[in-house]
Image (spheres, grey):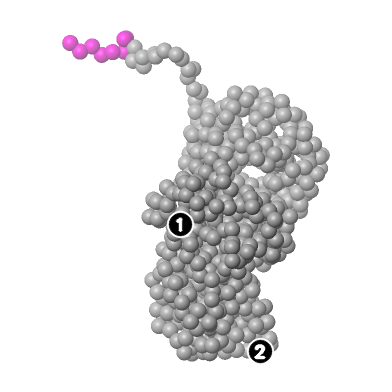
Amino acid sequence: MDKMEDYIEIAGEKFKSRLFIGTARYPNVQVMLNAIEASGAEIVTVAIRRIKPQTETENILELLSKKWKLLPNTAGCFTAKEAVITARLAREILGTNWIKLEVIGDEETLYPDVEQLVQAAKELVNEGFVVLPYCNDDPVVCKKLEKIGCAAVMPLGAPIGSGMGILNPYNIRIIKQNSKVPIIVDAGVGTASDVCIAMELGCDGVLVNTAIAQAKDPVKMAKAIKLAVEAGRFAYFAGRIPKKLFATPSTTMGDKIEIS
Amino acid sequence: MKVGIIGAGIIGLSIGWYLSKEGIDVTIFEKNEAGKGATWASAGMLAARSEIEPGEEYLLQLLIDSKNLWPSFAEELIQESKIDIGYRKEGTILIALDYDDASKLKSHYNYLKKIGIDVEILSSEKILEIEPFLNPNLIMGLYSKEDHQVDNRLVALALKEAFIKSGGILKERAEVKKVVITNDEIEGIIAKDEFYKFDFVVLSAGAWSPLIEGIPKHVIPPVRPVKGQALSIQMDPSNPIIKHVIWGPEAYLVPKNDGRLVVGATVEEVGFDNNITVSAVYSLLKACWEMVPSISEFPIKEIWSGFRPGSRDDAPILGPTRIKGLIMATGHHRNGILLAPITAKGITEFIVKGVLPSYIKRFTLDRFNTSWNEYKS
C-alpha cells in the first residue's frame, strides 16, 4: 500500500485521514482543539442542537471551522421529523449539505430507531443531502441505507460512550463486504486497539469521541488512535495469517545452521 | 490613583472591596444590578478538589490556594458587612447510583490520588448513615472534606455592602459603552454618556467581557457564554433532608441555610439564549429524584439560567494586558465564586505594588498568543 494514495472518498470528496472526531465531553475547548490537532483528523462532528451559532463572542463552531470540515449531526433527535428539521437547520447555519444522521430510539442504550432512521434518510437524500447515518451493526439495515443513497454508512461498534469496543466483528465484516459505500465504525471505541480492530476488518474509517474526550490525557489518546488507524489500515492491506490450533515453527529444520 | 471596574459580579466586587480597603479611589460600573449575573445563578460551591478534570491540572493550585483563602475572606466579609454568608463546611459527597457510575467514580478516585488530592471512599452504608434520604440503592461514594460551600447570593449582598462601607462607589444600571484607549494606554471609560478618567480599568464583566467596545481586537479576551440552567427546591430549613453537597452522575445538590436545595446545572453552548428549556428542567428533576426519591412532594422554589464566562481553557484570564492600565479579571467559568479571593488579592497586589504575583503569571491573556491565536482572525 502506498500511503500517499490511500484516502477515503465520500460523495466525491477525498480525505487523507480516516479518523473522524466528535466534539463533546472534553475537559475544555483548548484540550479539544489540541486533541483534534493531534489526531490528524480532517472532519469533526458537531451536535447542532447543542451548539447555536452566535458571532458576538468567541464560539466553538467558529474555532473549529477555521481548521476542520464540520460534519453536523442530529444527536438528541428521537423522531424522523425532528432529525430532518435539524439537518435543514444545520445546512442553513453551517452552509453544508453533509449530515451525520442520528435518530435515537432508546435513552438507556442510545440505540438507533431504525424505522425512523430509514425514513429520515430517504427524505434527506431526496432533498440533496450527503447523508451519513449512524445505525445498528445490522447488515440488512446497512444495505438498505446504502440503497437509499446514503454517501457512507456508520454502524456502531458498541453503544455510544460505552467504550466496549467492536462487539460484533463478524457483522462489521459482512457489512463491509456487502457495501459499495464507505463503512465508518461509529461509537463504542474505548481505546486504540478497538480502532485497530475496526480498521483490520476493512472498515474505511472510524469515528471517535468519548474514548478521546474522557481519557486521562485526551491529547495522548488522540495521537494513539491516529496511529491505531494507520496500523490497522496497514495490517488490513498486509493480510493477517490464518488462525491455527497448533504451533508452526518459524524456523524449520532446513533453515538451521549446523554447529559442530 | 483612580480605578474603574467594569462589572459588579463577585469578581468585580471583590477586587473593588480589596482596592478600596487599600485607600484607592474605586468606581464599579454595572449594567444591571450588582451580583445578579453568573454570581446569582451559581450554586456557591467551593469545590476545588472533587470537580477537577484530567487535563486541567494547571488550574488546580490556583483553585486550592483560593479555597485556602476563603475562610479568612469570609470572616472579614461577615465582619465588615454584618451579613452571614452561609459558609458551610460539611464537605462534598460524590455518589454512584449504579455500577457504571461506580467504576467511573473509582477511576476518578485513582486520578485524584495520583495528583495528590485527598478524598475518602465511602461505603453505601456509611453514606446512608450521614445522608439517610439518599437513594438506598446507591453503590458507593467519595467524600471530599475540604470542598465547602457558601450562599453565593448572600456573598454578593455582603460584598456590595462591604465595598460601599469601605468608601467605594457603585454605579448600578450604568452600562459601560466604551473603553477609551490612546496610544496603547487606558484613558478611562464612557458610561451613561459621561467620560470617567481612570489610571486602571479592570475588565470583570464575565461572559459579557468581550463585548465592551473600544478594546483592540488582539486584547479582546477569548471568553464565551456557557449557559447553565438550575433550579431550587424548598426544604424545611429547620429540618433539611440533605445536609452535604451531593454530586450525582447527572446533577449536583447544594443545600442552603434557608432550606433551598439548589439542583444544577446544565452546560450549554447556545450563546446568550436565556430560555428555560423542557429538557433541562426534566433532566435536573429526574437526576434529583433519582438521588433523593423523597423529594417528590417538595415545592419547587425557583428555576433560572445564567452564563458562565468560559475561557478557551476554562482557566481565568487575569492581570495586565498589552494596553497599559487595562487589567483582565474574567473567564472564571464555573470557578468564579471559588476564585474570588485569590483574584481580588492578586489584582490588588498588582495595582498597588506594580508587580504581578507569581500565582497569577501563567493566567494572563498572553497565554493565548500562541499558535491558537490564528483562530481569532
The magenta segment is A253-260
Q: Count up the numbered dots.
A: 2
Above or below: residue B80 compared with residue A240:
below
Q: Position of residue A12 (x, y in %)?
A: 69, 38
Q: Position of residue B24 (x, y in %)?
A: 48, 88
Neighbourhood count class around disc 1 (C-alpha, 10 Å): few under 14, some 14–19, many 20 upward:
many
Q: Earlier in the sequence, mark 2 or mark 1?
A: 1
Neighbourhood count class around disc 2 (C-alpha, 10 Å): few under 14, some 14–19, many 20 upward:
few
At 40% from the left and 79% from the top, the residue drawn is B355
Above or below: residue A171 compared with residue A132:
above
Quick one: SS at disc 2? strand
Q: Amino acid at mark 2?
A: Glu
Q: Position of residue B93 (x, y in %)?
A: 50, 55
Q: Which mark is residue B201?
A: none
How far apart marks 2 and 1 lie (CA) works out to: 50 Å
Is there any visible trace of residue A69 in the rendered image?
A: no
Above or below: residue A226 compared with residue B91:
above
Is there any visible trace of residue B282 in the rendered image?
A: yes
Q: Amino acid at mark 1?
A: Ser
Q: Quadrant of residue B257?
A: bottom right
Q: Position of residue B47 (x, y in %)?
A: 49, 61
Q: Which residue is mark 2?
A: B194
Q: Which mark is residue B144?
A: 1
At 64% from the left and 77% from the top, the residue drawn is B213
Please indicate whether residue A112 sits to the left or right of residue B181 in the image.
Answer: right
**The stretch drawn in magenta includes residue B156:** no
Read off the chain for label 1.
Answer: B
Q: State the quadrant of the C terminus of chain A.
A: top left
**The stretch drawn in magenta includes residue A255:** yes
Which of the two discs, 2 and 1, sits closer to the camera? Answer: 1
